[in-house]
Amino acid sequence: MKLTDEQKAMLEGEYGEGAAYAMKIEVAIGESFDAERMVPITRAHVALSNQDADLWFAEKMLEKGAHCRVSPTVNPGFCVSFFKERGLVKDEDAEMMMRTHNAYKGLGATLTYNCTPYVATNIPNYGEICAFSESSATPYVNSVWGARSNREGANSALCAAITGFVPEYGLLLDENRKGNILVNIEADMKSDFEYHLLGYCGKKIGPGIPVFTGLPSHISPESLTNLGAQLNTSGAYGMYHIVGFTPEARTMEEAFGGKKPERVVNITNKDLEDILEQISYSGNRKIDFAMFGCPHFTLNQAKHIASKVEGKKLSVPLWILTSYHVKELADRMGITQIIEDAGGNIIPDTCPDQPCWNWLNGKVGVTESPKCAYYPKRRGIEFVIRDLDTCIEAAIKGEVI
Amino acid sequence: MGKRYSCHKISEGKADGEALVSLDDIMFYLIKPETGVVIEPSHDLYGKSMAQKILIFPSGKGSSVVQADGLFQLNKNGNMPKAMIIQYPETVLVSSAIIMDIPMVDKVDPAFYEDIKSGDEIIVNADEGYIEII
């Protein structure tokens, strides 16, 4: 790979040991993908996870004196004050979150603690080269905004933020952004929920860049968020196209770059029903809690829940996970009050896959998100998966009907 | 000397050990760190251990945060695979392998996939770009 003088100097340690190590990793990634050069980025998002490897790597970088040249937004860990006040989190877990906070603060990250920056605080322009990690983020910035990011890992995105460069390969190049799988949607896409299930069809869709046709003409940001999140739970997708909707797929021809699809897949109502059957904890049953916001809920979704629970009493706890700024708006607009009066909470800065939920071990919840159900399995938490309105009804009644 | 096949280095190093072949993509988070056993239902390696094996699989899958942590936890327990042979590199998996110092290769001679089966003893030499079935 050809490096500029600046990049060489960085690799050789002139910008400090941390930048040199980050550059070494970036170069190794570039060489494994036969990249010819490194190109500058203007945005980054790091999927901070507050897990052992994440903290290990962030602290290692900080010890080496690294500082982000492009300050990245970051994913949620958990809201220490919320869980500490309620005695729901062990001291050692709270301490780890504080260490993660301090490490990323020291590295110069923008401490948003939100997994949907692409609809709020970190929105790239068309064609902008950036380094986004986080499963729902990469497909969104590539597909919906037409920006250019590879499907970065949390570590590689942090290296990009530190060096200010990424190797040029994959989705940064025109020729790799064309679709190769035609996915005909014959299923009824009634709400944001069906996009969760469609995204979960990764095994049937197969590897590559899917081109969706047959979707409704209006698709909400929430639906698109769900689609990307689940595509990367059931498989690994950096990009998709929706013909007549996403900017690089105005026509079928443009979406496929004039080539024929390598594969054609039809998705029917039966496929979505089968997926739901396969991933949801079985049957209609009593539940212990309801959890929403994986990916983080928008203000509209929080408002929707408020409209359904206003003046009612929930039978089980209901948590809406969201960003700090949506929480702030919800507070101002009285949405938080309505939800708290019913017995629920809006929690900022928090992800379902965090130690603050360990106390739910052995319990069964309800959620509309397959991703929310997937990762907490290893904490011994199970979920019945249903559409949002059925979930809200379940939280009111205490059972899924 | 056994039969050799060419390959392309992703992450440096070499290793030898028992091959474990998966037809499904792998997410290192749904592996029990204490045993290396795959706990993801409906995965074709479900119930099998990847500890200290040479893992042959198509590609990675799952949320971008979890691959590195899954491998980190396996490594802490001494149950990380010794090397990985993949078909479809993706950045999350590649950067995780480099950071965790696991040898990884791709672009393997197609004949390898006809010959290899789980249980074979093999050598992966990423630095010199070959795999050998002993």
Image (cartoon, coloured by chain):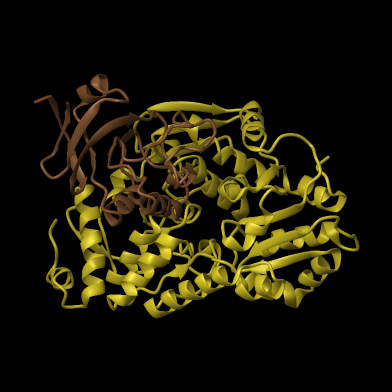
Q: How many marks?
A: 0
Relative height, residue B114 to residue B123 (above, below): above
Q: Position of residue B133 (x, y in %)?
A: 18, 26
A266, above or below A43, in the image: above
Looking at this view, name the residue that lies furthest to the top. Answer: B114
Query: Which residue shows up at 70% across the image and 71% down it?
Result: A87
**Residue pictured at 79% horizontal, 73% vertical:** A334
Image quadrant assignment for residue A9: bottom left
Image height of A213 relative to A349, above or below = above
According to the rendering, which colour does chain A have? yellow
Quarter of the image for residue B123 reads top left
Q: Quadrant of the C terminus of chain A?
A: top right
Task: Evaluate whether residue A275 shows in this view.
Answer: yes
Quadrant (top left, top right, bottom left, bottom right) of the N terminus of chain A: bottom left
Residue name at image x 17 percent, y 35 percent: B7
The residue closer to the viewer here, A175 or A157, is A157
> Looking at the picture, how far across and down is residue A222, in whole percent?
62, 54
Residue visible at 37% across and 45% down in the picture: B79
Of B129 and A72, nearer the camera is: B129
How far across and down, in percent of the image, does residue B74 sit?
39, 49
- The answer to whether residue A69 is visible is no
Q: Is residue A257 left or right of residue A391?
A: left
Q: Which chain is brown?
A: B
**Position above or below: B40 against A94:** above
Find residue B2 and report its horizontal and vertical position in percent: 12, 24
